[in-house]
Image (cartoon, grey):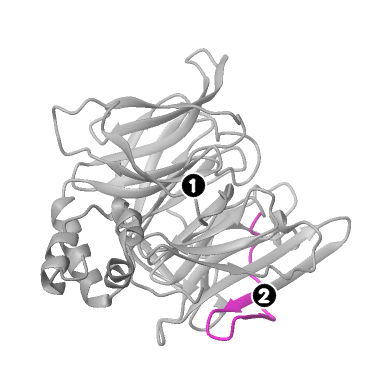
Amino acid sequence: MLNFPKDMAEEVLSRVPVTSMRKVRFACKSWNSLSKCRKFGKMHLGVAKAKNAKKSIVVLMMDYKVYLTSINLHDDKAQSSSCIEHEGKLNSLDNSYEVHVSQVFHCDGLLLCITKDHTKLVVWNPYLGQTQWIDPTHTFPRLDFYLYALGYDNRSRSYKILRFIDVFCPTTFVETNIYDFNSASWRVLDVSPDGKVDYYDRGVSLKGNTYWFAKEKPSETREGVDEEAFLVCFDFTREVFGPLLPLPFEWFVEDTATLSSVREEQLAVLFQRWDTSMLEIWITTNIEPNDVSWSTKCFLALNMTPFTFSGFQFPVTAASFFIDEEEKVAVVFDKIVLDENGLYINPNRNLAYILGVDGSVKKAFLGDSQYKHCYPLVCSYVPSLVQLNN
């Protein structure tokens, strides 16, 4: 291996699947160094993109473990049970032990993971095999009550972590902090969103910023009037929350919705009405921290049995989804709990619904779960060459 020409090694190793790079790095020191070279990385990712042109690679969390998963919806002959395949298991963040993850957030190829016991934060670049543990340093006694987001400054491309909380327990507790990777430290921000973002909501990062659902704060809500739902964004460049942004539908407290991103360029929202079970997916035509515009026609609309994330909390976003615009389908990850008669049948079975804009519905079983309250969670993934300071 020591006498193997570097250019030939680059050519050969660039054809290795992204999910097998861990084995390449363990082969020898020279291959480990080569795999982390920016020139090789660009070559490798270019080859991988061409090879997987007909596959969508996503990050999928099930049973507190994280997987790199491929979704192949381009082959008409493919069965729904075989179109979703785990390419690699990403739950081992360290050679000595496994880390169980309760929450995962994606931004620009980096993953922010919250451990299952809610005591540690780790930022992970799966492609380079690098991790960076972050000291959570928090004031509120329960770390899982905070909302987290990973983003970056669009001017300097410097990465940051946002953490904020606004709870009543038993008095109002408000705190907003930001972690800057350049200084490796937390600092307090004197900002808060105009609307109320619930602690169990999960934001979606897009173009360096993060978006959540928000509702009017109690002091701004007229008695006897349903709380109106909005979007709210945190701008990581200016380090401020933007104004409340409109949604393309009326949302009442019993309705449910969840967010996703499309090609790291657009925001999508899945919305299901409680009274008709009509499911809609809307996609933005333009999205910025201070402005949003929606397509005049929803991407998908069909009537189906409510997902298990339907309920009476606001908002309920247990399940998650992924869109393939070219194939005109949405893949929703959920659990089997209710049958068509509304009866509980199997709260431990993970399932993917493949929904077509033509009204078709297919199911792919993902296996049984040990934890009935741990819902499968999907988020987009784009391999990144961003170096972390270990």
Q: Amino acid at mark 1?
A: Thr
Q: Is 296 or 308 nearer to us in this picture?
A: 308
Q: Is 160 included in the stretch rendered in magenta?
A: no
Magenta segment's dominant SS is loop
Q: CA distance from mark 1 to mark 2?
A: 25 Å
Secondary structure of the residue carrying tag 1 is strand
State whether residue 26 is above or below residue 85: below
| Left-right relation of 133 to 235 | right
Task: Identify the residue position indicated by label 2 in the image.
Answer: 177
Q: Which residue: 79% across, 68% down?
A: 139
Q: Which quadrant of the structure image shows residue 88?
A: top left
Q: Nearer the viewer, mark 1 or mark 2?
A: 2
Number of other residues with Cα within 10 Å of mark 2, as a class: few under 14, some 14 to 19, many 20 or more: some
- Residue type at mark 2 is Asn
Residue 279 in picture, x, y percent from top left? 41, 35
Q: Which residue is mark 1?
A: 258
